[in-house]
Amino acid sequence: MNQHPDFLLNKINGPKDLKKLNLDQMNQLAKEIRTLILEKDAAEGGHLGPDLGIVEATIAYHYVFDAPKDKIIWDVSHQTYPHKMLTGRALAWLDPDHYQDVTPYSNPDESPYDYYAVGHTSTSISLATGMAKARDLMGKHENIMALIGDGSMTGGMAYEGLNNAAIEKHNLVVVVNDNQMSIDKNVGGLVTALKKLRDSNGETKENPFTAMGFDYRYVADGNNIKDMIDAFKAVKDVDHPILLHINTLKGKGYQPAIDNEEAHHWVMPFDLKTDKPTSPAPEGPTANSVALDEVIKHINSGENIMAINAAIPGVFGLDKIKNEYPDHYTDVGIAEQESVGFAAGAAKEGAIPVLFENSTFLQRAFDQLSHDVAANDLPVVMMVAGGGISGTSKTHLGIFDQVMISNLPNWIYLAPTTLNEEKAMMEWAIKQRKHPVAIKMPTKAVPEGKQVEANYDEIKYQVKKGKDVAILALGDFYSLGKKVADKLGATLVNPVSANILDKNTLDQLAADHEVIVTLEDNSLDGGFGEKVASYLGATTKVLNFGQKRVYTDQIPLEQIYKDNHLTVDQIVEDIKNVL
């Protein structure tokens, strides 16, 4: 049911309707959009601060330009809620029954006003520059714009994009949305450069953008619709590359999001009256707290530990290390490739880097995982969060980390089934100084488990004996394997590692069982199960369970499990069919 039938937004079916409004009406529209962002995010969770801060710029863009002929590429696209509301998708905010109608990022399958499925950072300038060059080649003349900011300028690809955008021969506008924040506080030398520009109202001679050849323009109040309309009118149809630097307020319109920007970048469902999450935080130790405690223990024992992350300390709860042990903490910005290269350098010099990476963002650093760490066999320790099948956007899937890490030489990828096992793996990984080690942090509620003291120099599977069927259940899927094993009276195996096989145990399991089953919370192609099947396949029947090699997009997790035969009943039935 439409919660706000009186809103102006109900009359906006596209940018043509927006162009009929006067300035007062557009300011009213901005208030409505903020109200709807807050209501939906409170109910569903989602990006909050970035969307609240970009409202006026979005209204001004669609008032001045002629989308979808004119094209805007939103970097990360986690700030496209206002854009979606103004391009025919407002019902997905006006009516709670339609909250699920749209995806959280730009999506060309959803609307002609979106040009890419984008959910990672720093790519917009490269995409826009490629489009501009193709437009020139084909003799067309539409306006092409990249909107980047909210930390995206700390990613290396942004500079590669700027380097090429600066020599575009015709129309190209790069909007730098400068809200002085990333997900956490912005880091690095760019902070200094942008501050000098803001403090001088864009007049400082120390301007990196003019030095590269851009026609530079500055808007002191990017949350003023009239100023933004004037700025966009001034750059529309200009026949050379322009950099438009706008100063905006992240979280505008909601004071808690202004007071604590990091906590309100992305939110879980919350109470609008109290700003408190409506879901209680888990009690007791978690995968994050175990990792944090382990790092702090080694810092306190005088070791040269370096905790490193790429702009997402909140994902891991790293604020304690950041605040209490600043010399042992580095946030490199939204630059995963930099974080891995940085860690490689630290390891070479003799420090012990502990990298905290999110599975879905780690793909951005594949070259560094291979060329800088693996090829040099450097003892980097890497904690990987979010590695598992999920019902999120296709831009944020966590099913590829095993495929990347496990198939590179020298990397050892460990997968704990309990919190104490995670702790033991970290302890070993930090002490050994031979190879790079990654640990797949549990994403599900796993038991604390009994104390573990283990040496992972040699991978030894942990076997609970049953009969006929052996189920190798990796990491998070160990609990799923236990349920299947209980139903079948099967042998249950914790394989410990996602990529190092215990061949002696596999040989024994194959000799004693009719069928070997592998379960993994990951893409099947290039995963753990295929390695087992490749080793045993000539002599033994092997069934692999995991996710097919597809991009799912906002599909409920239960549905994905069913589609991939990952429910207990489906797995049991499939096993019985081959016995």
Image: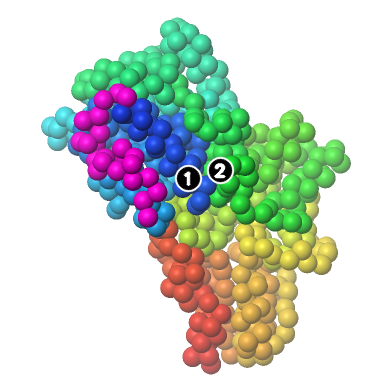
Q: Which residues are magenta?
A: 1-24
**Identity of the residue furthest to the front in this view:** 6
**Identity of the residue furthest to the left in this view:** 139
Quadrant of residue 185 within the rendered picture: top right
Q: Residue 289, which numbered label?
A: none
Tell me which numbered mark, 1 or 2, is placed earlier along the sequence.
1
Q: Residue at x 14, y 32 (%)?
A: 140
Was residue 194 drawn as part of the magenta stretch in this picture?
no
From this viewpoint, is residue 375 visible? no
Q: Residue at x 64, y 80 (%)?
A: 483
Colouring: rainbow
- Say which residue label 2 marks: 272
- Name the quadrant of the N terminus: bottom left
What kind of residue is marked 1?
A: Glu
Q: Position of residue 334 (x, y in %)?
A: 53, 36
What kind of residue is marked 2?
A: Leu
In the image, residue 545 above or below residue 426: below
The residue lying toward the viewer, choosing from 207 and 447, is: 447
C-beta proximity under 8 Å, tags 1 and 2? yes
- Say which residue label 1 marks: 39
Is 134 situated left or right of 374 in this image?
Answer: left
Q: Position of residue 568 (x, y in %)?
A: 56, 80
Q: Residues within 10 Å of mark 2 (few under 14, many from 20)?
A: some
In the image, residue 395 above or below residue 326: below
Q: Position of residue 536 (x, y in %)?
A: 56, 79
Q: CA distance from mark 1 to mark 2?
A: 8 Å
